[in-house]
Image (cartoon, rainbow, N blue to C red):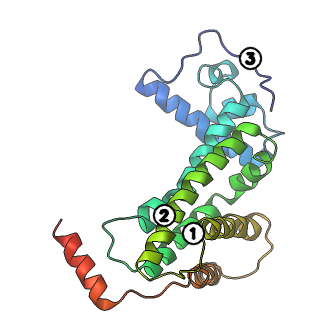
């Protein structure tokens, strides 16, 4: 996207006060609403400023353009969607089985995607032609995939996942399942089923594709004792 909006000569690098931080947050919230309502191309800086209750000129004290604020909105939303990976699946203090973690992480991810379906529909469109949005998503997915690769390899070492799987290819496949499926479901409306049914089917697909086995009771007991002794 070309940066067509003017930049104020005294635009600060970031908020310098609590009030500035609050104003910036108001602009981000307003921008998200405007993009959801009008899409990216039809949204204007003046629309965002008006929604935030600010003057048009105030916008440029915090952002250079609608492109810049959109990229920050997209980054924030997608970070929230990927949070279950670290919060649930990679939680080193969890005593849940891999299957239990997988089910909880997928449910949280799908809940977040459903809640953010309107803005995700816009993000999915923009990332296909905006180089910076595309690059940010590519970097985020690469970091996510590296975590999934390590997780799959660890499960294989513990004899819980199919040893014939290539962790790198498997991680890429799982990534496509957890990104494309919710877009098709919540954004495009191409699936008619209850939320619980959709989540359960996706969970089963992921678990079965990895060939996940339940941990032996003695292994879980040892792991729980080891965790408790830390």
Identify the element where label 1 is drawn: helix
Given residues 40 and 87, the one toward you in this image is 87
User: Do labels 1 and 3 touch, CB within 8 Å?
Assistant: no
Picture coordinates of residue 47, whole percent (x, y): 74, 33
Question: Rounded to the nearest whole Å, what is the CA distance between mark 1 and mark 2?
Answer: 8 Å
Label 2, on which residue? Answer: 150
Write the residue at 54% across / 57% down.
Answer: 146
Task: Decide if residue 223 is on the left or right side of residue 78.
Answer: left
Identify the element where label 2 is drawn: helix
User: Do labels 3 and 2 touch, CB within 8 Å?
Assistant: no
Q: Is residue 19 above or below residue 216?
A: above
Question: Rounded to the nearest whole Å, what is the CA distance between mark 1 and mark 3?
Answer: 47 Å
Label 3, on which residue? Answer: 6
Label 1, on which residue? Answer: 167
For the N terminus, the quadrant is top right
Residue at the left extreme of this rendering: 229
Residue at the bottom extreme of this rendering: 217
Picture coordinates of residue 166, whole percent (x, y): 60, 71
Question: Rounded to the nearest whole Å, what is the CA distance between mark 3 and mark 2?
Answer: 45 Å
Given residues 128 and 46, the one toward you in this image is 128
| Dot 3 alpha-carbon crowd within 10 angstroms: few under 14, some 14 to 19, many 20 or more | few
Picture coordinates of residue 139, whole percent (x, y): 61, 46
User: Do labels 1 and 2 touch, CB within 8 Å?
Assistant: yes
Write the residue at 47% across / 81% down.
Answer: 99
Identify the element where label 3 is drawn: loop
Write the residue at 62% across / 34% down.
Answer: 52
Picture coordinates of residue 134, whole percent (x, y): 72, 44
Q: Is residue 12 above or below residue 42?
A: above
Task: Decide if residue 195 is on the left or right side of residue 227.
Answer: right
Task: For marks 3 and 2, give the one nearer the viewer.
Answer: 2
Specify the quadrant of the image occupied by residue 167.
Answer: bottom right
For the C terminus, the quadrant is bottom left
């Amino acid at each position: 996207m070309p940066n067509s909006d003017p930049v104020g000569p005294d635009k600060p690098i970031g908020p310098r006060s609590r009030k500035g931080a609050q104003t910036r947050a108001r602009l981000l919230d307003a921008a998200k609403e405007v993009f959801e309502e009008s899409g990216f191309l039809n949204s204007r800086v003046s629309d965002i400023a008006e929604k935030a209750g600010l003057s048009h000129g105030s916008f440029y004290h915090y952002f250079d353009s609608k492109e810049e604020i959109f990229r920050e909105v997209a980054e924030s939303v997608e970070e929230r969607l990927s949070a279950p990976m670290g919060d649930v699946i990679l939680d080193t203090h969890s005593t849940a089985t891999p299957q239990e973690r997988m089910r909880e992480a997928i449910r949280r991810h799908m809940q977040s995607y459903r809640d953010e379906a309107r803005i995700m529909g816009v993000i999915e469109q923009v990332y296909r032609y905006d180089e910076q949005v595309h690059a940010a998503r590519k970097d985020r997915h690469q970091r996510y995939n590296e975590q999934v690769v390590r997780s799959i390899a660890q499960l294989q070492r513990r004899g819980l996942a199919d040893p014939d799987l290539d962790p790198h290819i498997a991680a890429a496949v799982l990534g496509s399942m957890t990104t494309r499926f919710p877009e098709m479901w919540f954004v495009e409306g191409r699936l008619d089923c209850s939320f619980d049914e959709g989540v359960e089917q996706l969970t089963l697909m992921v678990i079965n594709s990895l060939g996940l086995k339940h941990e032996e009771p003695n292994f879980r007991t040892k792991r729980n004792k080891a965790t408790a002794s830390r």
